[in-house]
Structure formats: C-alpha cells, structure tokens
Amino acid sequence: MSKEKAPFQYLPMTIVSKAMTAFEKIQVAQMNDQATFETPENIEKRAKALLKKIFGDDAQFALHFADVIDDDLHPRFAIDNMALTFMLGATPDDDCFHLSFLSAKPVRPIRSLAGVGMAMLDAMDIIDEHFLNHELGTEDE
C-alpha cells in the first residue's frame, strides 16, 4: 500500500500576507514616485480616466457631483440617468465604478462599456423583482 502525500497546505494567513506585501510595494512605489497616492486630486484624475476609458468621447457628458456629496475618496458622476460611484483600486486597472439606476444598485464592478450594459441588466432585474413583489404584496416593509 503506497502512501500518498497530502496536498501542501498553506499556513494560515500566508496568502493574506502575500497580498498585503504586494499592495505595500505598489503603495510605496506610488508614494515615492508621484507623491499623489490617494489624494483627492489623484483619485478624481483616475476616476475621470476610467470614465474616458469606458465612455470614450461621451465621457464629456458626465456630471461630477462635487458640490452635492463631499466624499473625496469616492467621486460620483451622473451620465444618461445613471449614477456612477468611483471605487479606487490598488492600481488603475483595479479601479471601477458602481452603478445606481432608478434606486437599483447592483454590486457588479464596472470597468468597460459592456460592464455598464451588464450592470444595467442587473439593475433592471432588481427593479423587476421589486415591482413583482409589490404586485404580489410580498415586499418587505
């Protein structure tokens, strides 16, 4: 009877430690190179860059809610009846928006125009479910 080795088991929190170390390297590099990591100006710049990436030339139609909501870490924009809240990632590739449409707030992160479409479908499903529950009298009060 041959003895099979059990698969290697990571020590608890080893992967968490690796993730924290990877993020620390990015954070230190950004702080040293740009001195702009997580400043309101840098966050807004990254948010606008992501708007441009998603919407192209149509990004010019996005309205920034700078005066309405005082949250420098999560700038909010409105475009075509959608509200978009910026979520800062560890890198610009990790940045995303969260969508709100007619009070529906799907949790899907948005990084592309197709992602906007997918989040809109999620929002419509949330809205449909709300109205169905209302018609059936099963909505939470």
Image (tube, rainbow, N blue to C red):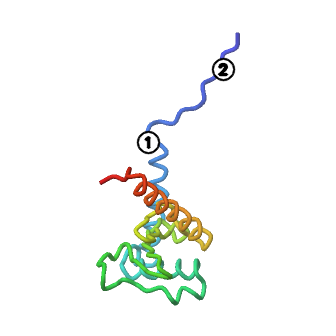
Left of 96 or right of it: where is 1? right
In the rendered image, the residue lying farthest to the right is 1
Residue 10 drawn at (x, y percent) = 51, 36
Q: Which mark is residue 13?
A: 1
Residue at image position (47%, 65%) is 90
- Binning the other alpha carbons within 10 Å of mark 2 as few (below 14), some (14 to 19) or many (20 upward) gives few
| Quadrant assignment, res 115 | bottom right
- Binning the other alpha carbons within 10 Å of mark 1 as few (below 14), some (14 to 19) or many (20 upward) gives few
Query: Is 11 drawn above or below residue 87 in the view shown?
Result: above
| Residue 101 or residue 53, whichever sits in front | 101
Q: Amino acid at mark 2?
A: Glu
| Residue 83 or residue 41, whichever sits in front | 83
Residue 16 drawn at (x, y percent) = 45, 47
Q: Tell me which numbered mark, 2 or 1, is placed earlier along the sequence.
A: 2
Residue at image position (29%, 78%) is 70
Residue at image position (70%, 14%) is 2
Mark 1: which secondary structure?
Answer: loop
Residue 82 drawn at (x, y percent) = 47, 76
Q: Which residue is mark 2?
A: 4
